[in-house]
Amino acid sequence: MTDRKAQLAANLAQVEERIASACAAAGRRREEVTLIVVTKTYPADDVRILHELGVRHVAENRDQDAAPKATACADLSLTWHFVGQLQTNKVRSVTSYADVVQSVDRAKLVTALSAAAVRGERELGCLIQVALDAESGERGERGGVAPDGVEELAAAIGAAPRLRLDGLMTVAPLAGEYAGRQRAAFDRLMEISSRLRAGHPTANMVSAGMSGDLEDAVAAGATHVRVGTAVLGVRPRLG
């Protein structure tokens, strides 16, 4: 086993233990939570090692990094998630490899994603990114739609050809009433998810929690956690 593979295997084992312990504490089955490894800034070689170690869900937040990496790993059985803020001029590229876009936060993006998915003859899963630091009608500091805009966006996705409404995503906010209160933020997301599922019962995916707060996300009920640093390590700054 190479040094890098051994390192990633050890890190994955620690993250797995954290998720399993959080599930046990919350009275949940381990199978209820899917680990998504965020591979941004890391090379395709690491993605290949992760696949060898059993990882099946990976995420990227920049198309310029993700597109060549997805191409280099096209022979692997992976589900690719796009989790970054997405500009419409990148949509055509992103829809060529992403299976799920977790950062849908405006109607214009829904229209662009649908058009690109139709053109590419692909079905694309969509998560609405909820900004818990945004006022009504506004977007969040890190992207996302205010909670009162979720239903309108859900209807748009539901009506858009080749798009599938899978659920909700959030990033723990750095400002506003939920700043520093990750568990409360994730509980609020679950409330919004419950309301969404009343009208869209298959939109049951809830993506929340990262390396530093995955336990809070699991306790709240998240179905997917997005972990980068705890698996891959802290990458040295360039330059």
Image (cartoon, grey):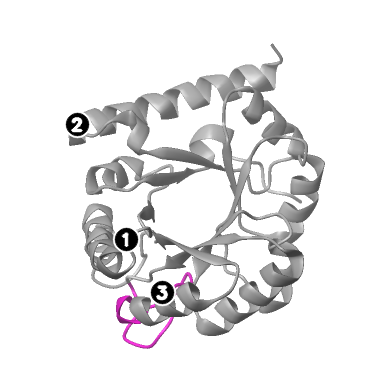
Percent x, y of residue 194:
24, 62
Disc ID at residue 171: none
Label pair 2/3, CB-CB below 8 angstroms: no
Identify the image quadrant of residue 77.
top right
* Element under disc 1: loop
Residue 148: x and y, percent? 30, 81
What residue sits 43% from the left and 39% below the top?
34
**Which badge, 2 or 3, is on the more N-terminal residue?**
2
Is residue 96 visible to us here? Answer: yes
- Seen in the picture, residue 84 relative to 133 is either above or below; the reply is above
Cα–Cα span, label 2 and label 3: 32 Å
Give the residues drawn in magenta, as a range: 133-149
Q: Is residue 105 visible?
A: no
Residue labelled with disc 2: 25
Rendering coords of residue 180 (x, y %): 28, 58
Decide which of 214, 34 is in the foreground and name it: 34
Disc 3 target residue:
154
Q: Quadrant of the N terminus?
A: top right
Quadrant assignment, res 175 = bottom left
Q: Which mark is in front, 1 or 2? A: 1
For residue 25: magenta? Answer: no
Q: Earlier in the sequence, mark 1 or mark 3?
A: 3
The kind of residue on which mark 3 rests is Ala
- Work out which residue is located at the far top of the displayed protein and give it: 1
Q: Residues within 10 Å of mark 1 (few under 14, many from 20)?
A: some
Kindly identify which residue carries mark 1.
201
Residue 207 as seen in the image, left or right of residue 229: left
